[in-house]
Amino acid sequence: MAQQKVNEDESKVPPLSLPDPFVSEHGKLIKSVSDWEGIRRPELLKAFTNEVYGGIPTDFDSISYEEVSENPNPFPETTLFKELDISVTRNGKAHTMRLNVFLPKSTNTPAPVILLINHRAKYKDGRIAEDGYWPVEELVSRGFATASFHGETVAPDDANKFTQGILSTLYPEELENPAGMRTFGAWGWAAMRAMDYFMQEPLIDSKKATIVGHSRSGKTALWAGANDSRWAVVISNESGCGGAALSRRKFGETVNIINHSFPHWFNDNFKKYNNHEELLPIDQHMLAMLIAPRAIYISSAKGDLWADPKGEYLTMQIGSRIYTDIYKQFVSFPEDFEDVQTPIHQALAGYHIREGEHGLTLEDWLHFMDFIDLNTK
């Protein structure tokens, strides 16, 4: 897919004209927290639901947690390891997802938790964690609990098989709705079920919870964070089109390319905007704003032009106006993307861009942890 001919020439980016996040659908100028939270935010959430991601259903009949022992603890000296089956029932049917949880062994006090949405298939060799991608030892040594689930156990990342999970079992009516839940909504639903567990686990401080996603999972992290205010920090790494990058820039991967390559990710309505991004009633800077007043962090890689690093930065820079203009909290980003030389770590909003290609690395995680520490102390 990355071999497709795409625009990676900044001079060919169309003039950027973005919809105004602070003017309601009926023309009301949004200036206060009450107007934002009572009028504009619900409008934007509904627009993203209807036109891009589909909703995330919140209704079910029961949920239960069962600890199983299928794999040995890979870090027995420093962590407590729990393999959890989370079973959810609705309308007489049930689905079970697996959540792997590591808790610091060095303390009995509740630890802040970081959830990684893992879109990779389960490792054939049985590994639970992976150096760089999910560096459990480094996270635990910094005092965090950390957990992860595989998206495959909720909605397979396959255009022909994505319904073979919660969509066909628990929420089949969503498939009949052009604005219904699809893969990213299903993964966001799973993140919510993980949070349900964190809230009743005495060794976890769920009020200091962070959700992290890379690439396609980074798109999910943003959408899950917008829908679930229980996440104190939302982090999206190299999420590109349909994630942190502005769609209207048409740089790197585009709406047309992503919908043809991955028709199961977004709802059916999003396909109306193939090659017509300018007709979208929203853009990704508005998605970033839906995280406020909680903290958001976006990161990029210089060699990952497919994900449009500048478009990701602009979403962070423009989206951060929600903190200054509405919540009256100071945040600041350089005017020009080219001026970003070092990680920007501040209260509520941050960004970094590193050398290298598309990937989730220990360097990224070290920046994430610094930002989380700053925003959860």
Image: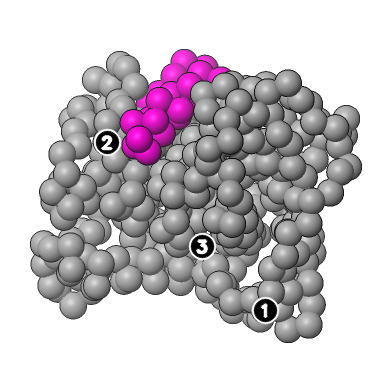
Front residue of 298 and 138: 138
Q: Is residue 63 above or below residue 154?
A: below
Find out whether the residues at labels 2 and 1 contact each other: C-beta distance under 8 Å.
Answer: no
Q: Which disc, if any, is residue 61?
A: 1
Q: Is label 2 in a helix, a strand or a loop?
A: loop
- Residue 11 included in the magenta stretch of the image: no
Question: How are the colours assigned in the image?
Answer: one colour
Q: Is label 1 in a helix, a strand or a loop?
A: loop
Pointer 1 or 3: first along the chain: 3
Find out whether the residues at labels 2 and 3 contact each other: C-beta distance under 8 Å.
Answer: no
Visible residue check, residue 224 = yes
Q: Residues within 10 Å of mark 2 (few under 14, many from 20)?
A: some
Q: Is label 3 in a helix, a strand or a loop?
A: helix
Determine the image quadrant of residue 279: bottom left
**Residue drawn 27% across the image and 47% down it:** 319
Which mark lies nearer to you, 1 or 3? 1
**Residue drawn 32% across the image and 17% down it:** 342
**Residue drawn 49% across the image and 35% down it:** 237
User: Viewed as shown, does residue 117 lie left or right of 318?
Assistant: right
Q: Position of residue 33 (x, y in %)?
A: 18, 62
The residue stretch that appears in magenta: 352-377
The amino acid on which the numbered mark 2 sits, given as a three-letter code, is Ala
Which mark lies nearer to you, 2 or 3? 2
Front residue of 342 and 104: 104
Q: CA distance from mark 2 to mark 3?
A: 28 Å
Q: CA distance from mark 2 to mark 1?
A: 38 Å
The amino acid on which the numbered mark 1 sits, given as a three-letter code, is Asp
- Residue 375 included in the magenta stretch of the image: yes
The amino acid on which the numbered mark 3 sits, given as a three-letter code, is Tyr
Pointer 2 or 3: first along the chain: 3
Residue that label 2 marks = 347
Residue that label 3 marks = 53
